Amino acid sequence: MKELTNIKYWIFDLDNTLYSGQTKVFSEVDKKMSAYISKKLNVDLIKAKKIQKKYFYDTGTTLSGLMKYNNINPHEFLEFVHDIDISWLPKDLLLREELIKIKEKKYIFTNGSHSHVKNITNQLGIEDLFDGAFAITDADFIPKPSIEPYKKIIKKFNLDPEKSILIEDIAHNLKQAKFLGMKTVWLENNEHFASKDKDKPYIDYKIKNLPSFLQKINILKAA
Ligand SMILES: [Mg+2]
């Protein structure tokens, strides 16, 4: 883990990474997606959920399937599905403390929207600690795990991939990061889709808890 003390660019996924998947924040977004599809395609919620999941598995995000097959307006979709009440989500003071100690550049890399980044980071109390965010709108709606958004975030923030690290809960989203030269960290979870590629060689580190992991690095750096 000593090699991680030389990282210059810290890249964090947003959902189920900066907050724990056990919070069920993302299931709020998930429900809004089903409601949107139900309304827009005029199908019941059960059918909507099926379409939602099929698009997600086939095209990387529900949104890309809806754009491809149903010609929906991506901005309208993003605004609707990310309009969630997460006022119950507590601040993460430990995460804040460890992020502050990381003096290198820090970025958020998400298949969601910028307003979702703002909503989540404000609620966690970490909104002032990042040097930038790369959202699905910056990626021309081409999501991770396609290689394009990884190339685009490198370009947008002028990152050196050899000095970068990506932390993610979806194991296969680490593949292209590793291919481009980044260090990769998988946040362990039991969700079938997120964990099915957990034993792939493109994963450098597996961690159970983000603040504790950052704390370990910060202690190593201070030594
Ligand atoms: Mg995630």
Image (tube, rainbow, N blue to C red):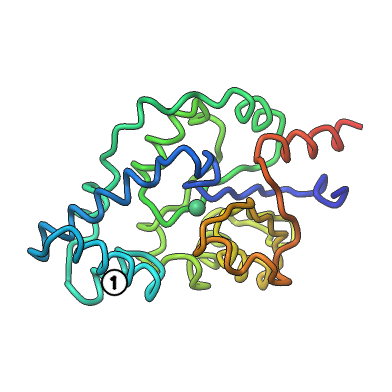
Which residue occupies 48% across, 65% down? 144
* Secondary-structure class at tag 1: helix
Q: Is residue 197 left or right of residue 19?
A: right
Residue at numbered disc 1 = 65
Name the foreground residue: 90 vs 135. Answer: 90
Q: Position of residue 140 (x, y in %)?
A: 36, 65
Name the foreground residue: 42 vs 135. Answer: 42
Quadrant of image for the C terminus: top right
Q: Position of residue 8 (x, y in %)?
A: 72, 48
Which residue occupies 42% across, 57% down? 111
Dividing the picture into quadrants, the one containing residue 137 is: bottom left
Outermost residue on the left side: it is 42
Q: Is residue 173 above or below residue 79?
A: below
| Kind of residue sitting beneath label 1 | Gly
Q: Position of residue 125 (x, y in %)?
A: 50, 25
Q: Is residue 63 above or below residue 30?
A: below
Name the foreground residue: 170 vs 135. Answer: 170
Q: Position of residue 163 (x, y in %)?
A: 74, 56
Q: Is residue 147 left or right of residue 186?
A: left
The reply to whether the residue tagged 1 has its Cβ within 8 angstroms of ligand 1 is no
Dividing the picture into quadrants, the one containing residue 40 is: bottom left
Label 1 environment density (alpha carbons within 10 Å; few <14, some 14–19, many ≥20): many
Which residue occupies 71% across, 67% down? 181
Dividing the picture into quadrants, the one containing residue 151 is: bottom right
Outermost residue on the right side: it is 223
* Labels in figure, total: 1
Which residue occupies 42% across, 41% down? 24
